[in-house]
Amino acid sequence: MKVQLLFVMAAAGLMAQTADPKMSFFITSAGSGNGADLGGLKGADEHCAKLAKAAGSKKKQWRAYLSQQPEGKLKAVNAKDRIGKGPWYNSKGVEVAKDVADLHSDNNKLGKQNSLTELGQVVNGRGDTPNQHDILTGSQLDGTVKPGTEDSTCKNWTSHGEGSALVGHHDRQGGGQNPTSWNSAHASRGCSQPNLVATGGAGRFYCFATK
């Protein structure tokens, strides 16, 4: 419903923020509403594209920064391999990373003030109410999928119940194994919307333009 309202507002010209033409990176202003069930990588990509279009972006191809584990006919996919070569700019036109190596280094400009939604909104972080700094990635620090059979992608983004997913902290602070990591801070408690909310998330994820 929240996403539908966003589209209606965009069509009516009621949105206060129009994305900078250079925008090629954002945090989703809303998740699927169904926990970590995003409809797989395809569904997540489509969500990115819809939000970007509603915000006025003319970019032709958007990809979710999500990894996929090998399962059945599905092959392993690394989030870092899905997002193009860069550079990437936020919805205000600020460059957050020049390329894949820069994105996964300490030199990137990601953080609470620059990791904005497609509408230019600052996402709640640690210390805000509610805290929503957990961002779904299913990825390790270097942007690759975690090896082994332990679930780290909420059953490849199709579960809203059992399982777990690796999440990052967009504000670069908090708890977990890597509290300052934007893409791999810790594992989620579960995959349902209530479980994601309980540990400081909202089912949001990162989107990058490849074209």
Image: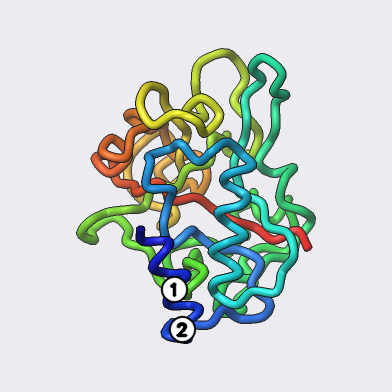
In this view, the residue farthest toward the left is 129
- Residue in the foreground of this view, choosing between 96 and 66: 66
* Residue 44 in picture, x, y percent from top left: 57, 46
- The residue at the point 60 percent across, 77 percent down is 56
| Residue 186, quarter of the rendered image | top left
Q: Are marks 1 and 2 in contact (CB under 8 Å)?
A: yes
* Residue 194 in picture, x, y percent from top left: 26, 38
- Residue in the foreground of this view, choosing between 36 and 150: 36
Say which quadrant the C terminus sits in: bottom right
* Type of amino acid under label 1: Val
Q: How is the image coloured?
A: rainbow
* Residue 129 in picture, x, y percent from top left: 20, 59
Q: Which residue is mark 2?
A: 12
Placement of 114 over or under 184, stated as above or below: below
Placement of 188 over or under 94, stated as above or below: above
- The residue at the point 56 percent across, 29 percent down is 156
Query: What separation in Å lies between label 1 and label 2 (alpha carbons)?
Result: 6 Å
Q: Residue 55, which numbered label?
A: none
* Residue 84 in picture, x, y percent from top left: 77, 53
Q: Which residue is mark 1?
A: 8
Placement of 179 over or under 49, stated as above or below: above
- The residue at the point 56 percent across, 13 percent down is 149
Determine whether the residue tagged by mark 2 lies in a helix, strand or loop.
loop
Determine whether the residue tagged by mark 1 lies in a helix, strand or loop.
helix
* Type of amino acid under label 2: Ala
